[in-house]
Image (cartoon, rainbow, N blue to C red):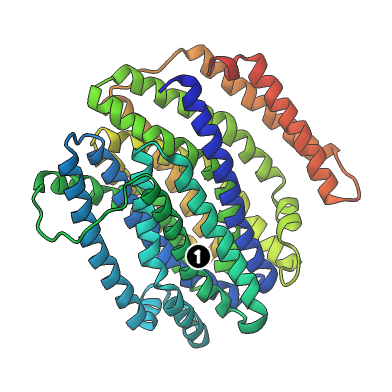
């Protein structure tokens, strides 16, 4: 793939993902408008937590392992049998899991969110029962997206995710006047089913969708290899989703609204973080699998450090800006309808803590892809387990009684930073990475320092009677300064 084609792909996928992520963010804003930081908002968010968690963790593991194995297969017959076996057993597992969620919806909610009041348990359980079928569709959508991506069809998978978020919002808004909060219960499974339908259409169009039930595993070596890759990803490759899940488990024990406040703040951090990461990893991971097969370590090093430098250039300055302007950002985006000034204060407090770790979360996702592409899964698994279930939970457990929801946000941020530095040290050794010229890194750090000073000064000096105008003026100054510095330093042209 030529460099020009490579960046065209990233550009188009980025645009589609910007729209998709924006619509996903609009969904959270609609929840904020309708319910603010109330117990109903908590119930909607908690009910969707488990299907979305399974989607991201199980679906992500299946797609990641599938791409790694499939890209190294040569014979079409083996590929078709491999498809059929994965389809059969994944279908059986997801149908069984969905049925389990529906039958024991109340028990599952009480198990994971044991701090809820009886009325909140009842409402969350009803919504979870309605949303549970989305689990099946969401997991298959992730796998189908992997099938399309490995064949070079990146656009279709991105458009399917866009359709999912768009229809979720449409259904929730359309049905809300008639059935209230239960509109979200219908929105989750219906929109997920539509996403699968879009993917099936693109697969059928490209001649891929011709699966059959196959219980006999003839290509055992491929299936075993996929399981070997997928199992570690379940623990080490989806740490962000474990963070969200743990956040909501602990937040369910706090006063009403903190589940929602933590969710709104984390979504604000996710928006810029995931826009770049989703596009980059979607295109980069298949290339990594190819370069790994060729044992092209020089090419892998170039992709690694170029990607890491780009992440720093775009995410760190945005983190500084969001930290300084946390309260105006939350107020302008959310403070409508049932979202009060108190809701803004709660959310902004969480946002300032989360944004400190925004780069670390993005970088962790980026770095782990290199380990999995080279089938060296121990480091991301080990560091992920220690960070999420060790550092994170320890910080929350020790400080939650004293600092409440802030301890949950700090646990996420500190553990993400811990994992990033651990992965960076291990990555340079295990992946045989060679760092490029140090001059570029020095210019980057100096540019970031100047941008930080400019943002702080703009907060002190730019004051009008309108929060939106203040934010726009400061944002323009920030963007122009960052671009001019990066361009002058040669970081954009030489990246």
144 lies above or below 155 = below
* Residue at numbered disc 1: 191
Question: Which quadrant would residue 97 be assigned to in this image?
Answer: bottom left
Corner quadrant of residue 100: bottom left
Residue 16's x, y, as percent? 56, 44
Exactly how many numbered labels are in the figure?
A: 1
Q: Quadrant of the N terminus?
A: top left
Q: Position of residue 142 (x, y in %)?
A: 38, 53
Residue 341 percent location from the top left of the image:
75, 65
Identify which residue is drawn at 52% across, 87% down.
119
Residue 291 at what x, y percent from top left?
A: 30, 25
Residue found 54% across the figure and 53% down from its top: 162
Q: Residue at x 51, y 75 (%)?
A: 186
* Disc 1 element: helix
Q: Residues within 10 Å of mark 1 (few under 14, many from 20)?
A: many
Q: Nearer the viewer, residue 143 or 21?
A: 143
């Amino acid at each position: 793939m030529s460099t020009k084609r490579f960046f065209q792909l990233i550009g188009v996928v980025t645009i589609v993902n910007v729209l998709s992520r924006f619509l996903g963010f609009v969904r959270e804003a609609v929840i904020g408008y309708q319910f603010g930081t109330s117990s109903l908002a908590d119930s909607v968010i908690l009910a969707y937590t488990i299907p979305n968690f399974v989607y991201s963790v199980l679906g992500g593991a299946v797609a990641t392992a599938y791409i790694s194995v499939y890209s190294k297969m040569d014979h079409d017959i083996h590929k078709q049998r491999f498809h059929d076996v994965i389809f059969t057993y994944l279908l059986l597992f997801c149908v069984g899991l969905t049925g389990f969620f529906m039958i024991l919806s109340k028990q599952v909610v009480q198990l994971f969110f044991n701090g809820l009041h009886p009325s909140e348990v009842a409402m969350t359980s009803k919504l979870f029962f309605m949303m549970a079928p989305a689990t099946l569709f969401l997991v298959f959508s992730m796998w189908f997206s992997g099938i399309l991506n490995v064949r070079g069809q990146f656009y279709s998978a991105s458009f399917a995710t866009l359709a999912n978020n768009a229809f979720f919002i449409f259904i929730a808004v359309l049905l809300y006047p008639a059935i209230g909060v239960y509109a979200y219960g219908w929105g989750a499974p219906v929109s997920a089913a539509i996403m699968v339908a879009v993917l099936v259409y693109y697969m059928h169009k490209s001649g891929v969708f011709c699966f059959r039930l196959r219980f006999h595993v003839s290509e055992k070596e491929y299936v075993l290899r996929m399981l070997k890759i997928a199992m570690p990803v379940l623990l080490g490759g989806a740490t962000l989703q474990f963070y969200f899940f743990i956040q909501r488990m602990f937040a369910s024990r706090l006063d009403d609204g903190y589940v929602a406040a933590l969710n709104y703040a984390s979504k604000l951090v996710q928006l810029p973080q995931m826009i770049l990461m989703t596009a980059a990893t979607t295109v980069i991971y298949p290339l990594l699998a190819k370069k790994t097969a060729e044992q092209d370590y020089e090419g892998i090093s170039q992709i690694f450090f170029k990607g890491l430098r780009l992440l720093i250039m775009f995410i760190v300055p945005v983190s500084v800006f969001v930290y300084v302007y946390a309260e105006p950002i939350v107020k302008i985006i959310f403070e409508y309808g049932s979202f009060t000034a108190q809701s803004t204060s709660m959310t902004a407090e969480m946002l300032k803590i989360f944004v400190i770790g925004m780069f670390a979360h993005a970088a962790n996702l980026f770095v782990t892809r290199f380990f999995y592409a080279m089938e060296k899964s121990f480091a991301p698994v080990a560091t992920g387990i220690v960070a999420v279930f060790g550092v994170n939970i320890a910080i929350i457990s020790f400080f939650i009684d004293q600092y409440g929801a802030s301890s949950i946000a700090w646990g996420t941020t500190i553990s993400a930073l811990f994992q990033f530095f651990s992965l960076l040290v291990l990555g340079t050794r295990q992946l045989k990475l060679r760092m490029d010229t140090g001059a570029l890194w020095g210019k980057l750090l100096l540019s970031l320092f100047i941008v930080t000073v400019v943002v702080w000064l703009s907060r002190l000096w730019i004051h009008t009677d309108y929060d939106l105008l203040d934010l726009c003026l400061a944002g323009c100054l920030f963007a122009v300064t960052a671009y001019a510095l990066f361009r002058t330093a040669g970081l954009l042209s030489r990246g």
